[in-house]
Image: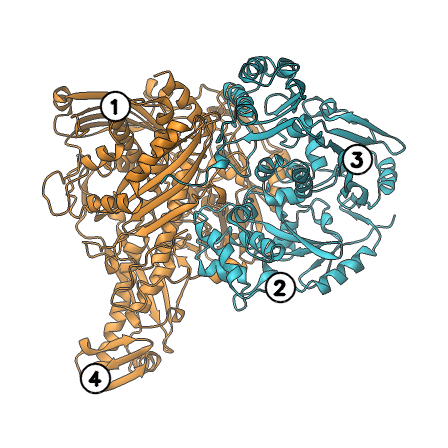
Chain colours: A orange, B cyan
Amino acid sequence: MNMQRDPGPPAGTQVGKSLPHESATLHVTGTAAYTDDLPELTGTLHAALGLSSIAHGRVIRMELDAVRAYPGVQAVIMASDIPGANNCGVVIHDEPILADNDIQFYGQPLFAVAARSHEVARRAVRLAKIEYESLPAILDMDEAIAAQSWVLPPAEMARGDAASALAAAPHCLTGFAKVGGQEHFYLEGQIAYAVPRPDDSLHVYCSTQHPTEMQHLVAHALGWRSHQVSVECRRLGGGFGGKESQSGQWACLAALLAWQTGRPVKLRLDRDDDITITGKRHPFQCHWEAGFDEYGLLQGVKIELASNCGFSADLSGPVNDRALCHLDNAYYLDAVAIRSLRCKTNTVSATAFRGFGGPQGMFMIESIMDDVARHLRLDPLAVRQRNLYGPAAGHERNVTHYGMTVEDNILPQLLAQLVETSDYHARRKAMATFNANSPVIKRGLALTPVKFGISFNATLFNQAGAVVMVYADGTVLVTHGGTEMGQGLYTKIRQIVAEVFGLPVADIRFTATDTSRVPNTSATAASSGTDINGQAVHAAAMTIRGRLAALVAQLSECQPEQVRFVDGRVYAPGFSEDFADITRRAYAARIQLWSDGYYRTPKIHWDPATRTGRPFFYFAYGAAVSEVAIDTLTGEMKVLRADILHDVGRSINPALDTGQIEGGFIQGMGWLTSEELCWQQAGAQRGRLNSHAPSTYKIPTGFDVPEVFNVALFDGENLEESIYRSKAVGEPPLMLALSVFFAVRDAVAAACGPGSRPPLVAPATPESILRALRHGREGA
Amino acid sequence: MNTRAIQFWYRGQIHKVDNAVPTRSVLQHLREDMHCTGSKEGCAEGDCGACTVVLGEEVDGELRLRAVNSCIQFLPTLDGKALFTVEDVGTPAHLHPVQQAMVECHGSQCGFCTPGFVMSLWAMYQNAPTCPGREAITDAISGNLCRCTGYRPILDAAKAAYALPRKALDTAPILSALARLALLPPLHYQSHGHHFFAPRRLSELLLLRAEHPHAKLLAGSTDVGLWVTKQLRELGDVIYLGQIAELKRIETVEQGLEIGAGVALADAFAALIQQEPQWLELARRFASVPVRNAGTLGGNVVNGSPIGDSMPALMALGARLVLWGGDYRRELPLEAFYLGYQQNALEPGEILEKICVPDAPAQGRLFRTWKVSKRYEQDISAVCGAFMLQVDRHGLIGDARIAFGGMAATPKRAPNAEMALIGQRWNADTAEAAVQALADDYQPLTDLRASADYRKEIAASLLRRFWLETGAGVAITRLGQIHEVSA
């Protein structure tokens, strides 16, 4: 395996270095504490949930006497016991913390128990006797569309006259594409630990990407105000979007039980409960019509996009809007008409997941590219390259269908470089020879690009705050609104602060992210963590540095701009002292050694009514080439090689960025290949999620990593004034895995013959691949 | 028999437990009783590996180390063994080479799965003095899921650990402690109203079964563990088979191999592969290393799951079971053991003693076994098939044994397909006739692993592949044969 190419540090000494994760030594020794590892306070109770066992209907009778009487049970709460708002819907208030009467999905929480141990609580909830009246349940998008069942009204997005463009195009094609949902499978399950404090207040330790939202939900559930609740999170054992809105219900229930019992209450979901009752990536499907010329250049596209949002709106509005804003992926769509259906079904509410609708939107346009190429018997790469947005320097074909100008399109160059380094064309030729001589095993190859918009679509979330404290001894404590879920946010922030003060990273420490230290924070989501929190922290640190520089300028009789902070020392003409000496002097001189910092992303605006504007500060780019082999007897598949070239601007930490790229790629590969969500389709348990544990839901393992895996960072910098000209990297690499899916399709097509458009649906499980082979060979 | 505390080596001394429920998991004990929270719970079913610990046992004077899932190991099964957790391996100030390499290669992101990976890699490092190849490394971490890194840095770290100065475990004090523990009487542990017995001889087992006829028999707990963690079932009294020496023997006899019912899957597969190399791929895909270390071949056979992966091949190879009833033994072919879904031929008081697998005749035997699942490693079969033909010197098929898992309520042979083969020449027409006949052998179900149609289709595909590989001479028929990329 090849190591990534390190583009080298910028001017500074800490930013640009491949430093290990700030908690790496704690991780490997098992001493990094997660919420469940915190020492428990005396009297701590443990909670478990009673869940519905129908998908849709009403509770006729709920008998909980046996639950209450079970030895060790301290409290049982139902919807009617909630003093404030029985709601954890974050955009629209359509999601109860506990179902009061209406049951909307199989596994919906009906009541909660607090007991002396986790095991006692789990045993007790099974003693409930519940009678239901079942109603017909809608499980999939087609049923929902037929019933006009929506969580939000259908939406449109359009540019130009798609109908005329289609009519005028030399070639026209229709198609259907479908991609499944995805369970986050964070290794640390959902957990909240609520501790009552005096004078009607609560502190909640919670594994969440969004402490502020937890604070608000808990306060509302208790009928309290925000300043009565504080929420803290030092680290998460993975999030991926699954602990954004989805951690709210558990924080609320732990808090409600703690409030009722007056004792600390920990609610840790068992893995099966976690997978059953927390939201997942939205499944999407798409009927499309495309008009294009003989070279595959798109002239007009009509798309009907549908997503399965589950029973409530949750974040489905913004997720679907992001899907609409990524239906172009890297391609200029001249005349386009899109209708977006947000289906309501009796399944768990779909939610945020790395990419947030973007991957699903991109899947659709890549399906169209693939079909157009296969119809014309062209290499799909040629069609993809032909349709790219205009190059950075040009002014043609560079405005998205929602009106944002693509100012720094580096993809033509990036693709050319990757084609070269991955030896695409030679391998394409060699593969054709192999396939001609191999009756059972067929290989496939695909190169797909990524263009991903960075910023929250909703403008208001693009703000962040921080507090930097320098102690008199020269050590630094930092706190900000972002959460550390493995992505390395704290590590990058530490590098930024170390850079500003010229200190070794060991001199910078963090507090846990805590709503009582920085208020009104945004979710650590939308890849924005470092972009916005890094800027806020940078601003705070620069304020303090400015004060120190002024002091040193006074001492050394120079201008503050001449003062430099390097390697733990402070220099001015004819002056040199340890950083710690300067901070002691500053304290003695009564200079404020701490500061807040604040940042709001510039330039962005979005009109939700017309769905136009500049929702994104900038775009992150990348591309991947994947080679796969399939077994045409069984449909089994193996990824043999992946080459990735990805744009992170000027990297703050190349090793961490590479980790995000590789991890995102493999996670995306899982979404598109082995990870299949299976709902019971018939019988009394219709609507039950049968893939509710790692035994039944298969994320990639070490074996699935391609043996040849070349990952490189594209040499460039952010055109915009981002933090140290870096680019966000959390989500974009997930979509590099589209290359795996289309390589599989390429292999299936190779088995089916020239011009075939095998109807492969994602996830491309062995069964899905074999079905596509059969239909492809039959010419279906 | 007098009761006594559970005793095992843990953190540098002999650790005693006398008040835990007998079905308390090792992980619960570590996290909740000992407040050692390095080991994590990710799934409580032995599928994610966040809870991985390493067990040490004395084997032929050496300390044998094996990674297992602590979430589904009951505490009393540790009696007489050594337990190693992430807390034993190194500290932030004194990292073990495996930990150092994980840090240097950026092998952790969120870090929650990391202690489990460290333990799997530590076991590999201790057991392999030089760096193993990629295949062995991915196998070593086959029981560990990571959702952040994409594994590449962890695979690199496994190699990089060997480039650092080697740090060997001082086994002498541990072996001497284990020797002292071996002098204790067999474990009879009693707590919260339940008994847990760990007899060391079959004769002791006989007495215990007579005295406690309702006691549950426990082997590797890779399935029974989930009855407790997931179904919250009360097991009542338990008799653990894992300490009975007679059940842990592998013997080569004149007719073939005799594998004691209590032999760990890892050891059983090693012996089976030596006897018949075609087991290799199946063994590699069978669950994961920690499950193969804890689970037993006898447990897999007696459990009788329709998707138990050892049985199709054992059936195709003509394996026979020896059942032991205390004062008698009886033998029967494996396929006669299964009477229906989760029903078998064991009479009250009987146990499976050993599994006998005949050697191949000098020539003429063709054998293959494959499984198909959504994921290569650590998955449950959609279909698992095994094929054996005995071709005589005239080129005629004298015997045919085909068996499948995932196609019926039990692992089951394919009489129609076999009939279509016997007496025929092994050629394309025969193969196709057998494929056609196979369609009448099974009526599989649709479930989350596969639809009925897909199961029927790939059962036929595997039979076709058997022909392609053993008769048609097609060079490449499997993904496992593809390593090189195009160029």
Query: Which of the 4 image quarters holds residue A175?
Result: top left
The amino acid on which the numbered mark 1 sits, given as a three-letter code, is: His
The residue tagged 2 is B168
Query: Can you see residue B240?
Result: no
Work out how far the residue at label 3 is from the one at label 1, CA to CA, in angstroms: 64 Å
Crowding near the residue tagged with mark 1, few <14, some 14–19, many ≥20 C-alpha atoms within 10 Å: some
The chain carrying label 1 is A
Crowding near the residue tagged with mark 3, few <14, some 14–19, many ≥20 C-alpha atoms within 10 Å: few
The residue tagged 1 is A375
Label disc, if present, on residue A573 of the rendered structure = 4
- Element type at mark 2: loop
Label disc, if present, on residue B254 of the rendered structure = 3
**What residue is rendered at 69% in x and 39% in y?**
B296
The amino acid on which the numbered mark 3 sits, given as a three-letter code, is: Glu
Tell us which disc is closer to us: 4 or 2: 2
The amino acid on which the numbered mark 4 sits, given as a three-letter code, is: Pro
Work out how far the residue at label 1 is from the one at label 2, CA to CA, in angstroms: 62 Å
The chain carrying label 4 is A
Query: Can you see residue A219?
Result: yes
- Kindly indicate whether the residues beneath marks 1 and 2 are on one polypeptide chain: no
- Element type at mark 4: loop
